[in-house]
Amino acid sequence: MTTGWTMKLRRFVEARLSPEGELGLHMTVGVALMLVAIVVFHEIAEAVMGMAQITVIDLQVAHWFNQHAVPWITSFLLVVTHLHGVIGAITLATLLGWYLHRKGADYWLFTLVITMPGVMFLNLLLKYIFVRARPSFDEPLLQTALSTYSFPSGHTATSTALYGLLAAYLICQTAPGAWGKRIAIALGAFLMASLVGFSRIYLGAHYLSDVLAAMAESYGWLAICIAGVSTLRRRRHIRQTK
């Protein structure tokens, strides 16, 4: 009996770690990343709602940037933040979709189609669950009226998903063993998303914790979207080869 269960467990683990399996390594990694993201998001959300030390840091960071703003940095970050608003995100996602279509990357295009609307809806849902007020200042740097809640940051969530998806696609196109190039691509995507998040903090649209939670939210959603579509692709391939 023990040997039978041992063999079943061994086969299960081998299947979960198989690079070629329908529910193999890609799904294992995707689920693991999603769970890590959920834990990180939960910890941040719990700290924010419980008014823990992070909320004090949030206020200190927000007011420091508001009081020490540099005109040319403000102008640059205004461009960054406006380029990644709702209209900007839709435009960038459309351009990425066109690029993926031209490359014949149909499954990646499908991943984009479910990832971007999904992360926008999820972010809006979370905003209305946590209903955190935006930062407020006597002399705000951002003059645009903000109609939604603060936690988590929508700009950061959409840009993280967009650049993360692009990075994942580009990494999959690299030659086996090209780890330097893969790391550079991943780092570039992270820095772009971080720049958008920083623009929201600097301009006083969001707190630091809003941005960190948005990145966790988005990475978790992106991981499960990529893993899910990869499973769909593998399942279809297996059926076609039978």
Image: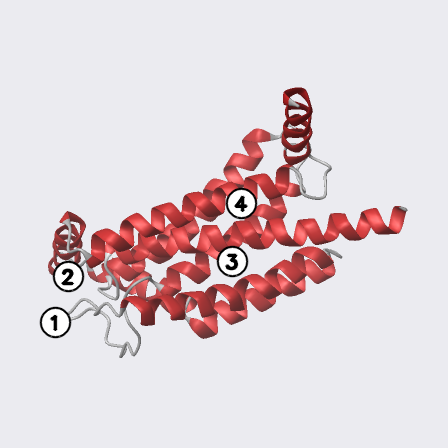
Q: Residue shown at 29%/79% (left/top)?
A: 147
The residue most toward the front is 1
Please, what is the three-letter code of the amino acid marked with disc 2? Asn
- With 63 as the anchor, is 155 left or right in this view? right
Can you tell which mark lies on residue 162?
3
- With 137 as the anchor, is 23 left or right in this view? right
Label 2: few (<14), some (14–19) or many (≥20) C-alpha neighbours in 10 Å: some
Give the CA distance from mark 1 to mark 4. Answer: 44 Å
Q: Residue shown at 45%/45% (left/top)?
A: 35
According to the picture, the residue beneath numbered tag 2 turns out to be 66
Task: State the SS at label 2.
Answer: helix
Q: Are the two marked residues, 2 and 1, in contact with CB atoms closer than 8 angstroms?
A: yes
Please, what is the three-letter code of the amino acid marked with disc 1? Glu
Label 4: few (<14), some (14–19) or many (≥20) C-alpha neighbours in 10 Å: some
Give the CA distance from mark 4 to mark 2. Answer: 39 Å
Q: Residue shown at 32%/56% (left/top)?
A: 211
| Mark positioned earlier in the residue sequence (4 or 3) | 4
Please, what is the three-letter code of the amino acid marked with disc 3? Leu
Q: Which of label 3 and label 1 is nearer to you?
A: 3
| Mark positioned earlier in the residue sequence (2 or 3) | 2
Percent of width and height locating residue 240: 87, 51
Q: Quadrant of residue 143?
A: bottom left
According to the picture, the residue beneath numbered tag 1 turns out to be 139
Foreground of the two, 23 or 112: 23
Can you tell which mark lies on residue 31?
4
Give the CA distance from mark 4 to mark 3. Answer: 19 Å
Q: Quadrant of residue 125?
A: bottom left
